[in-house]
Image (cartoon, rainbow, N blue to C red):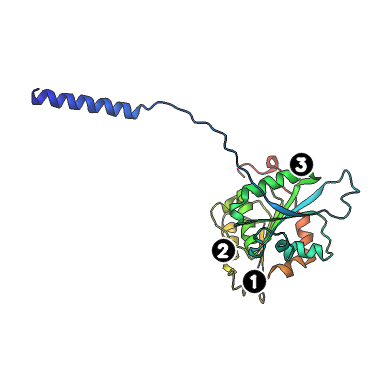
């Protein structure tokens, strides 16, 4: 074959391959992926729940700190809201305290499924679902609300940390952040930078309380403050169709 003919053949084949590469076949992939999730949890029903057959109640999700991780719910009972409730403290809400075996941000799907199940099984007011957590649970609170901002009426993350990615989703959510100024475990800057980032995105419903003399335990003072509970239970979820356009 002459050199010119060979060159023409190569050019022709190259053009055909290029055409084939840019004219790919249209295909569709579809599959159902099922995931099994499980969480053990403590459940506390408020006084009057049994007698008020038609009454719907707020639901408060509590996320424990790192000391609660494991396979025994006794570890969850030792701190935060379970400790308060089992000492006789009354909270006018259905309180659920699940136990994780790994970091909370790895359990978001399980938490969402748990909330869905509780909403079906109990008389939950869907517009008054709240979340709070301390330490690792404070970080879990940030992770959960960032991924599920429209599910909650308000959140109280205590001495937690989180990512600023997706923080704009929280501009409409009432959030009250608490931290100790002398926290040696989770520096207070972990909370302040998230609050500043949220405000920079236009968030006007976030506030922060820093206890000047507190170390890591910022939750005891927080949960003992009646003003915190008054604020929390006054919040209601804003329906999607009632939000300003563009939100």
Image position, residue 234 (x, y; %): 78, 55
- Farthest front residue in view: 71
**Circle nearer the N terminus (2, 3):** 3
Q: Nearer the viewer, residue 122 or 188?
A: 122
How much space separates mark 2 and mark 1, taking CA atoms?
A: 17 Å
Residue at the image position 58 percent from the left and 51 percent from the top? 168
Image position, residue 57 (x, y; %): 81, 49
- Farthest left residue in view: 2
Q: Nearer the viewer, residue 33 or 163?
A: 33
Residue at the image position 76 percent from the left and 61 percent from the top? 82
Kindly state the secondary structure of the residue where label 3 is placed.
helix
- Farthest right residue in view: 51
Task: Give me the disc on residue 243.
Answer: none
In the rendered image, which quarter contains the C terminus?
top right
Image position, residue 15 (x, y; %): 25, 26
User: Mark 2: few, some, or many residues within 10 Å (few <14, many ≥20)?
Assistant: some
- Find disc 3 in the rendering and name its residue: 120
Residue at the image position 64 percent from the left and 46 percent from the top? 37
How much space separates mark 2 and mark 3, taking CA atoms?
A: 37 Å
- Find disc 1 in the rendering and name its residue: 216
**Circle nearer the N terminus (2, 1):** 2
Q: Quadrant of residue 63?
A: bottom right
How much space separates mark 1 and mark 3, taking CA atoms?
A: 36 Å
- Find disc 2 in the rendering and name its residue: 193
């Amino acid at each position: 074959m002459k050199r010119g003919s060979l060159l023409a053949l190569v050019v022709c084949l190259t053009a055909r391959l290029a055409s084939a590469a840019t004219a790919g076949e249209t295909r569709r992939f579809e599959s159902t992926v099922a995931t099994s999730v499980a969480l053990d949890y403590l459940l506390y029903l408020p006084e009057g729940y049994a007698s008020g057959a038609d009454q719907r109640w707020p639901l408060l999700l509590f996320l424990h700190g790192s000391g609660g991780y494991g396979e025994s719910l006794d570890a969850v009972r030792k701190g935060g809201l379970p400790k308060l409730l089992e000492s006789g403290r009354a909270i006018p809400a259905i309180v659920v305290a699940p136990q994780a075996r790994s970091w909370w941000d790895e359990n978001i799907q399980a938490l969402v499924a748990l909330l869905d199940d509780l909403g079906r099984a109990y008389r939950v007011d869907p517009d008054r679902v709240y979340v709070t957590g301390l330490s690792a649970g404070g970080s879990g609170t940030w992770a959960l609300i960032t991924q599920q901002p429209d599910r909650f009426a308000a959140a109280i993350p205590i001495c937690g940390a989180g990512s600023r990615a997706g923080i704009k989703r929280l501009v409409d959510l009432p959030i009250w952040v608490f931290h100790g100024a002398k926290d040696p475990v989770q520096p207070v800057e972990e909370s302040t930078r998230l609050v500043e980032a949220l405000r920079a995105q236009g968030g006007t419903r976030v506030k922060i309380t820093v206890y000047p003399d507190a170390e890591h335990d910022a939750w005891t003072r927080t949960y003992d403050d009646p003003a915190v509970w008054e604020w929390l239970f006054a919040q209601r979820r804003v329906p999607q169709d009632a939000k300003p356009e563009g939100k």
